[in-house]
Image (cartoon, coloured by chain):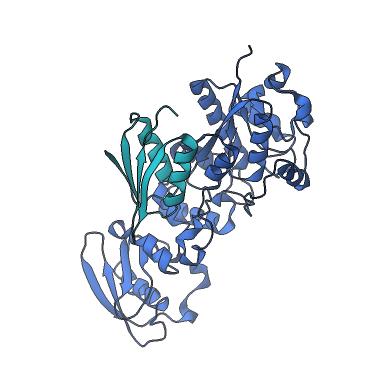
Amino acid sequence: MYTLDAKRLLCPMPVIRTQDKIKELNNGDQLTVVCTDPGALNDIPAWCRINGHKVIDSQQNDDEVIIIIEVNSGS
Amino acid sequence: MSKQRKAVSLISGGLDSMLATRAIMEQGIHVEGINFFTGFCVEGHTHAIRKKDKAKPKRNNALWVAEQLGIKLHIVDVIEPYKDVLLNPKHGYGANMNPCLDCKCFMVGKALEWIKENDFDFIITGEVVGQRPKSQRAETMPVIQEESGAGDLLVRPLCAKKLPPTLPEREGWLDREKLFEFSGRTRKPQMALAEEYNFTDYATPAGGCCFLTDEVYSRKLVDMWQARSDRDYELDDIMLLKVGRHIRPRPHFKLIVGREEGENKFLEGYRKIFTHLRSTSHTGPLVLIDGKLGDDDLELAAQITARFGGGKTAEQVDIEATFTDGNTKALTVSPISPAKMDPTWYI
């Protein structure tokens, strides 16, 4: 399980950081992205859909958005 | 069997790049999208920092367009290399601080680097001859091809028939007859094509997709450079220009005043790197100080802070200033009167 801290970044920076981090990971790895921009709740899953990665879970509390992704490097 | 040709399309999130991409996909070309983030891009949720805008869609239009088209999208951070485009535009600025022609040359040049690295064949943009006064004129079309280095690997499907044939057309990868000859500022041909492609929902950003085309934003940017006697900037600097009232009562400091809860929350993230003020006796905004406060300045900053809070008509308001080293100072001030708020202080 890998973690990416994208707090305080406004979209699309959390998406860019996620994209760059996933390039370093292997098929089946899981990445937890922690953001503060609520826009990430839409943008990161959208980026995952078009690039073939799987969103395992996404949740939002008062201050943070947490998204867990399973990497599909064959996509 | 002929080789599967591949193109990368510059996706802004608007209708034109969406149509141009689809037109090329219709010809059997494999297309992927590319979107460059300069730091000045306007996103649907850049505005949603403000709580009143929370009901607006928070989608990133470039991602949304890619999803509608069923293509991959590569978002590229060009914040650092873009500085040179903004600071030294060979072709100058538009109505505000927008270096549109240089920007287009830069982005097509970056797309050229990308296709070379990724073994793609050509580049697509949604440009239309005569659509934009600075960057999309008949005279600028060849300038972009030349200065980006893309030459005839750059295809503009929406106005291709108004331009000389490009390499993909000459080689037969694309059927020129199936491309278009749109021109001018009218949007009718795009609307008709959108209907033909069954695109019913698309972004129509007023004023473009870049903060540099915005007069107020550009004024704040120039003010920041003048105050610092330096035109360099970091991402945080240009993000903060998008948020709050910016008030410069003295040349050496300005206040960034949150206008409502969403902005205050956003500014909270910067508390540790800026001296900041807020009222302890009344409701009110978080105020960041950009610059160095002299001995007499803190009182003035506190008076202005009091002016924008619930105590604006009170005799006295308690303000707490917190400095970057964590130390605090309590002040009791009278809110500055509206008459003393010089209109020129507002940037």
Which residue appears at 72% of the width and 38% of the height?
B128
Chain coloured blue:
B
Where's residue A60, x and y in %? 36, 56
Identify the residue at horizontal 42%, vertical 64% (top origin). Answer: B263
Q: How many marks?
A: 0
Depicted B49 relative to depicted A32: above or below? below
Question: Is B62 on the left-hand or right-hand side of A16?
Answer: right
| Residue at left offset 43%, top offset 56% | B240
Q: Is residue B58 left or right of residue B102?
A: left
From the viewer's perspective, tell me whether residue B66 is left or right of residue A69: right
Q: Position of residue B48 (x, y in %)?
A: 48, 59
Provide the letter of the chain coloured cyan: A
Q: Is residue B322 visible?
A: yes
Q: Is residue B94 left or right of residue B44?
A: right
Q: Viewer-proximal residue, A39 or B132? A: A39
The residue that appears at 44% across and 82% down in the rendered structure is: B337
Q: Splitting the image into 4 quarters, where does residue B247 fall?
A: bottom left
Task: Residue B28: name its quadrant.
Answer: top right
Which quadrant: the N terminus of chain B?
Answer: top right
x and y percent of residue B170 in the render?
Answer: 73, 18
In this view, the residue in front, B122 or B30, is B30
Q: Which residue is most to the bottom? A: B315
Camera sees residue B257:
no
Q: Position of residue B205 (x, y in %)?
A: 62, 52
